[in-house]
Amino acid sequence: MASTVLYMSVSLDGFIEGTPDMPDHGFGRLHEWVFRDERPQGINGQIWDEMLSTGAVVAGRGTVEPANYWNGDHHDGVPIFILSRTRTESEYPDVAFVDDVVDLMTRAEEAAGDKNVLVHGVTVARLALAAAVLDEIELHVIPVLLGRGRRLFVENDEQIELERTRVLEGEGVTHARYRVIK
Amino acid sequence: MASTVLYMSVSLDGFIEGTPDMPDHGFGRLHEWVFRDERPQGINGQIWDEMLSTGAVVAGRGTVEPANYWNGDHHDGVPIFILSRTRTESEYPDVAFVDDVVDLMTRAEEAAGDKNVLVHGVTVARLALAAAVLDEIELHVIPVLLGRGRRLFVENDEQIELERTRVLEGEGVTHARYRVIK
């Protein structure tokens, strides 16, 4: 059974990006471990391989539009599902828009077959978590206190239990994987 | 050389306690791994031993007053230094009040000799971090999204780099240790 997995780089103080006054909005610091033209070595390469062995990609427009929809191909031509209430037509054959997060995740899971679904972007992740359609969270914890910026987890009335399933120590990053207990 | 080490249980979303409407303010959930009458088993016991092999304790009044100053003895009669701008006299011989965080940490380090200093409490930790007198952070990361409560790290204009020095997987908790790069 496919699992929907959020992969997210985050500072130790919980930010997924900084503020406009920081170099590259703090985004560069959080993605040093993976923003290279080539596959990183060691543990970080293992995580890279896992991300690129997923069978579908889910994202929000805030993620894909700055990335220009990855020119329609995130990796290996796997289908890409974008959460949008307004867009329906895509210029790329492998990119589809879906207006509901549960439908979004269901369609991605079906498309991924026995592979996992790579979840990109904090808005989609929050909505999926709230709708109980996010199965796993893989945090790439960066050893920095960024101080300010956009948080991964916002204030929430619901308490959500997790199960730690794996911790891997990559160079300059700790990969901590959790399963959401539903 | 002694090291000043913050030991802190924290939810994955960054809270050190919840809100009054939660059972035990959420505090119980975050301390299940250590709130027992006896030393926990395995990795968690190793962390317990480390905390109790420190040579001095530093805390704020928000920590020690609800705990009734640990009746003057946190463990093994090591000296206890409390940050307070107003109090000076203590009823316990091993408890001293210090009004400045740098003096507080310096006195605790001197008292601890070649042992580490156990830092208790979020206010002292924040002040010590800002004053560059906190050497290490040992987070006990609990696999729960608490949703609301009191954060360990608050918004801050300073970006602080850390070095991950150890990750240990205890039962129901991940112990992640960092050295503050000054």
Image (tube, coloured by chain):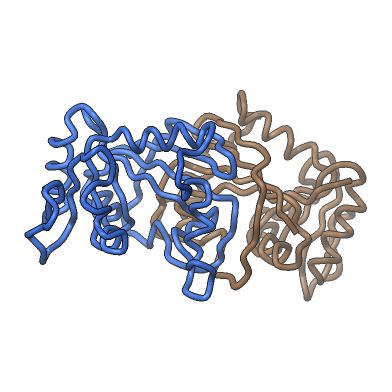
Chain colours: A blue, B brown
Res B60 → quadrant: bottom right
Residue depicted at x 47% and y 61%? A27
Residue B35 visible in this rendered orientation of the protein: no
Residue B157 visible in this rendered orientation of the protein: yes
Residue depicted at x 7% and y 60%? A88
Q: Where is residue A42 in the image (x, y as percent from the top left)?
A: 54, 31
Between A51 and B143, the residue placed more toward the observer is A51
Q: Is residue B151 above or below residue A74?
A: below
Residue depicted at x 86% and y 47%? B2
Which residue is the extreme one toward the left?
A89
What quarter of the picture does the C terminus of chain A occupy?
top left
Between A73 and A116, the residue placed more toward the observer is A73
Residue depicted at x 60% and y 73%? B157
Between B61 and A80, the residue placed more toward the observer is A80
Residue A46 placement, left or right of A159: right
Residue A75 placement, left or right of B146: left
Residue A20 placement, left or right of B1: left
Q: Where is residue B101 in the image (x, y as percent from the top left)?
A: 79, 67
Q: Position of residue A17 (x, y in %)?
A: 45, 62
Give the total of numbered labels: 0
Q: Position of residue B116 (x, y in %)?
A: 82, 44
